[in-house]
């Protein structure tokens, strides 16, 4: 039996192996297993994609390939990022957990940075579509999917998978024994694979027979058969602008109609809200100083009078420089000029506000 670790020690350990995932359709969480050199997540997080953007404490944001999808158990495996330096965490080998045992759930809810919540196991045998799950009350939110459920010895005991909508901290995690078996079965072959929904066998790309499972004959979609993502409408126009400005669009995508760009010392979020027809660019700059704020406020108001197309605002302690474009007036040449102005101004103002007004350096909010 492993010795219990302090909660803080567990959190700090998992901060380095729990990664943030983003596709054109969604965001979620994954965690690295050094024994297998894979990232584990949920299938529904990466569904209909060949690759995923991963970001973590120990490596630069990058695109990695999906190597296994499992719609039956809602599991997926990704290739490890290059030059990552992520440490080892252990998978539990125990099967004797009890209701009331303490657990931690780690992840990136709502696309935020690393979050850990604490709770207890509430039910060890909740069945959903004939699959057994652990039920627990460690808070889970959208974006936590695919993250690890960890015991107080610091070992992974499950994969956080779903919640009860409108429930009060009712979360469900795939038990560790299913993950163990799936990892072992998948790693028998050194190629991409998909679990067949009908017969539950893993089908590897070298064995699929013209799009059909070789064991039961069911139609099956392999990872290599998926179409590459292509944006449409205004989203396509926004992506073309980002590419024209010199950024890798695959690394910028952060869920549907949302992009994140690092420019100098500023982070810029670009979002398209189809219902309102607004394209919004928000550059998150530095924080308000702790004292002598009036000169800075005065300066921001003066800049709002002089700036064309850009507006300063303050949300909490954050200083934000924003650009608004209505889709009905969208013109690619004009929009490109305004976006470039937002990028350049964000970096310039971020440095100026720190150096001349004592603003505090920005933390990672997103």
Image: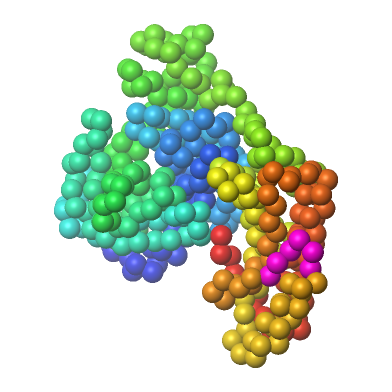
Name the quadrant containing residue 82: top right
- 208 left or right of 364 in image: left
Quarter of the rendering occupied by the N terminus: bottom left
Q: Which residues are magenta?
A: 307-312
Residue 261 sits above or below residue 125 on the image: below
* Rendered residue at 58%/48% (across/down): 276
Colour scheme employed for the rendering of this structure: rainbow
Relative to 139, residue 305 above or below: below
Please state which of residues 363 and 85 is positioned toward the viewer in this rendering. 363
Q: Is residue 88 magenta?
A: no
Residue 164 relative to residue 252: left or right? left
> In the displayed structure, does residue 98 sit left or right of residue 280?
left
Residue, x 32% and y 57% (percent of image)?
139
Residue extending farthest front: 328
Looking at the rendering, in which quadrant would you find the C terminus? Answer: bottom right
How far across and down, in percent of the image, does residue 107 sit?
43, 54
Residue 239: quarter of image: top right
Residue 168, horizontal then vertical, whole percent? 26, 56
Q: Position of residue 275 (x, y in %)?
A: 55, 45
- Residue 310: quadrant of the picture: bottom right
Where 2 sits versus 250, above or below? below
Q: Using the image as rendered, state which of residue 190 and residue 23 is in the foreground.
A: 23
Tell me which residue sits at (27%, 60%) in the image.
119
Question: How far across and how far down the image is residue 179, in percent?
Answer: 35, 38
Q: Residue at x 42, y 10 (%)?
A: 214
- Answer yes or no: is residue 134 visible: yes
Outermost residue toward the bottom in this view: 292
């Amino acid at each position: 039996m492993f010795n219990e670790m302090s909660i803080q020690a567990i959190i700090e350990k998992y901060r380095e192996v729990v990664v943030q995932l983003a596709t054109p359709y969604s965001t979620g969480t994954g965690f690295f297993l050094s024994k297998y050199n894979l990232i584990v997540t949920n299938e529904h997080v990466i569904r209909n994609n060949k690759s995923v953007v991963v970001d973590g404490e120990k490596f630069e944001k990058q695109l990695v390939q999906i190597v296994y999808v499992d719609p039956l158990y809602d599991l997926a495996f990704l290739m490890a990022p290059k030059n990552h330096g992520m440490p080892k965490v252990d998978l539990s080998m125990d099967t004797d957990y009890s209701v009331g045992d303490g657990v931690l759930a780690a992840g990136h809810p709502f696309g935020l940075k690393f979050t850990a919540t604490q709770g207890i196991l509430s039910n060890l045998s909740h069945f959903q579509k004939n699959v057994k799950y652990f039920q627990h009350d460690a808070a889970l939110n959208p974006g936590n999917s695919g993250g690890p459920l960890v015991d107080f010895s610091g070992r992974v005991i499950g994969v956080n998978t779903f919640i009860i909508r409108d429930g009060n901290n009712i979360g469900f995690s795939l038990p560790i024994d299913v993950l163990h078996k799936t990892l072992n079965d998948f790693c028998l072959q050194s190629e991409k694979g998909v679990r067949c929904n009908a017969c539950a066998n893993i089908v590897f790309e070298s064995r699929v027979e013209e799009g059909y499972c070789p064991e039961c004959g069911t139609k099956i979609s392999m990872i290599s058969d998926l179409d590459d993502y292509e944006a449409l409408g205004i989203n396509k126009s926004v992506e073309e602008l980002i590419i024209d400005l010199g950024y890798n669009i695959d690394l910028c995508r952060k869920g549907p109609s949302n992009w994140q760009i690092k420019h100098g010392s500023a982070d810029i979020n670009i979002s398209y809200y189809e219902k309102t027809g607004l394209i919004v660019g928000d550059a998150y700059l530095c924080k308000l100083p702790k004292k002598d704020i009036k000169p800075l406020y005065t300066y921001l108001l003066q800049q709002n009078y002089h700036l064309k197309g850009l507006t300063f605002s303050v949300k909490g302690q954050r200083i934000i420089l924003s650009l608004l474009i209505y889709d009905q007036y969208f013109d690619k040449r004009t929009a490109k000029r305004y976006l470039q102005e937002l990028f350049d101004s964000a970096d310039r103002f971020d440095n100026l506000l720190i150096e001349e007004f004592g603003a505090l350096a920005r933390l990672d909010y997103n």
